[in-house]
Amino acid sequence: MKRSTVAALAVLLLLGGYIYFFEREPAPESDGEPVFDVEQDSIVRVDIRERGEPEVTVEKNDDGWRIVAPIEADADPDEIDNLLRSAATMSFERAVAKASEVDLGAFGLVEPSVTFSFRTEAGEEQGLAFGSDTPTSGNRYARRQGDEDILVVASHSSLGFEKTAWDLRDKSLFDLSEDAEATRIAIDRPAGRLVFARVDGDWRLEEPFHARAEAYEASGIASQIQSAEMQEIVTDGDFDRPDFTVRLELAGEEEPLVLEIGEKRDIDYLARSPSRADRFLVDGALVDDLAKEASEYVSKKLFHYSTFQVHRFRIGERTIEKDGSGEEAVWRETAPQTRDLDRSVVEDLLYKLNSTSATEIAEGVAFAPKVTIAVVSGDPEREETTELGEPGEDAVYARREGDDVLLKLPLATWQEIEALVPLTPKAETEPEPENP
């Protein structure tokens, strides 16, 4: 064996024994000691130097946090909050050596993987450099700025500081208050224009036809636009005519939010907005929701009331009202005659009407109303009216008041409702058997 090879092997053995010596003690069972003595709210500047990445500097001003290097942009408040919380709560398990007495290269601290430092409003500066993993799994070496001790910290501790400028950047498309309420959505798209409007608290479809909208669909689009984020900033490509243009109006705001969406890029889409100078990518899931058939946005429910909030209802010429509340409530038919009704049968009917949904939305079908059902519920009171037509061979069509489209119900479903419509009078109910 060559002398140089023997020498190299000896160095490796010494280094292995050296690391083993420092790591031979098991980790303590306690939560450890704080790495920094700092209050989260006192930090006003942060610097992050991740190996192979540009140094990132974030500073606090009167308006919040802003990235000042390597770019200038507003910072994401949640990302900054997580970063500062990591600094204020981070702990170490033990100190294993003094920096002046050991080879820092053996601990990965000559060229740290990540160095995090901060300045407080009092001008105090602290920092931490992360080195290599320890021989025991789940731990890393670290060294505080200006401190001799080489510490052992949990490996996951460094994840909170491995942040690029993009990670910390505020990627929100729109600067909105948390309670901003959408009132109207207009979507120009290849499949035809869609317009939603909030009327008396409910979403309605106004184009391409009038119909009550599925609340989750309409509010979901509004929420996605309000909370939309840039997936990436792009410098290439543009579009003269966007495929999708969304205008979202908000209560109390004069100008709508505008988002224009163009070509697909892998799983995302190129987009732009008058609120930003950059072109960017938006999540493809948003485009999937914007591209649905108009009928998919329509609610298929016959009614939308809560059964226990109903005050009265009408079926054809019959009017039924609720007298009282709770267990003492009585359902009473007041027209064309007056009589008390079996409460359980009435509530079964109301529940059945409220839980019935169409199998599909129909257009261009001849419709002749046979019976009209109107339900009044809530506080303040609201009335919902639905017309039902003559039963066909396998289906019955219904139309809600104000809708242009019809709801197609299975014939068996309507027959279940019809079976309850006679509403047994209370006097005709079978008496409950007496307890022996």
Image: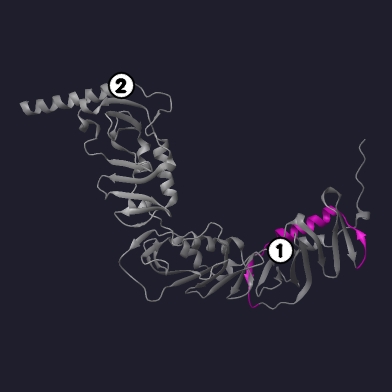
Q: Earlier in the sequence, mark 2 or mark 1?
A: 2
Q: What secondary structure is found at the residue carrying circle 2?
A: loop
Q: Is residue 129 magenta?
A: no
Whole-Å distance between the Cαs marked 2 and 1?
A: 70 Å
Q: Is residue 354 above or below residue 15?
A: below
Left or right: residue 269 compared with residue 355: left
x then y, percent, for residue 311:
80, 60
Residue at 30%, 21% (x, y): give it: 24
Q: Is residue 436 above or below residue 200?
A: above
Q: What secondary structure is found at the residue carrying circle 1?
A: loop
Residue 107: quarter of image: top left
Q: Is residue 351 magenta?
A: yes
Residue 86: quarter of image: top left
Residue at 35%, 35% (x, y): give it: 155
Residue 32: quarter of image: top left
x then y, percent, for residue 344:
83, 52
Coloration of the structure image:
one colour
Amino acid identity at mark 2: Arg
Q: Which mark is residue 335?
A: none
x then y, percent, for residue 41:
44, 43
Foreground: disc 2 or disc 1: 2
Instruction: Identify the magenta region.
Output: 336-364
Which part of the image, by quadrant, shows the C terminus?
A: top right
Question: Which residue is under mark 1?
Answer: 303
Q: Is residue 137 among the parts visible in the rendering?
A: no
Question: Which residue is under mark 2?
Answer: 24
Is 187 or 435 nearer to us in this picture? 187
Q: Is residue 413 among the parts visible in the rendering?
A: yes
Amino acid identity at mark 1: Phe
Which part of the image, by quadrant, shows the N terminus?
A: top left
x then y, percent, for residue 242:
41, 73
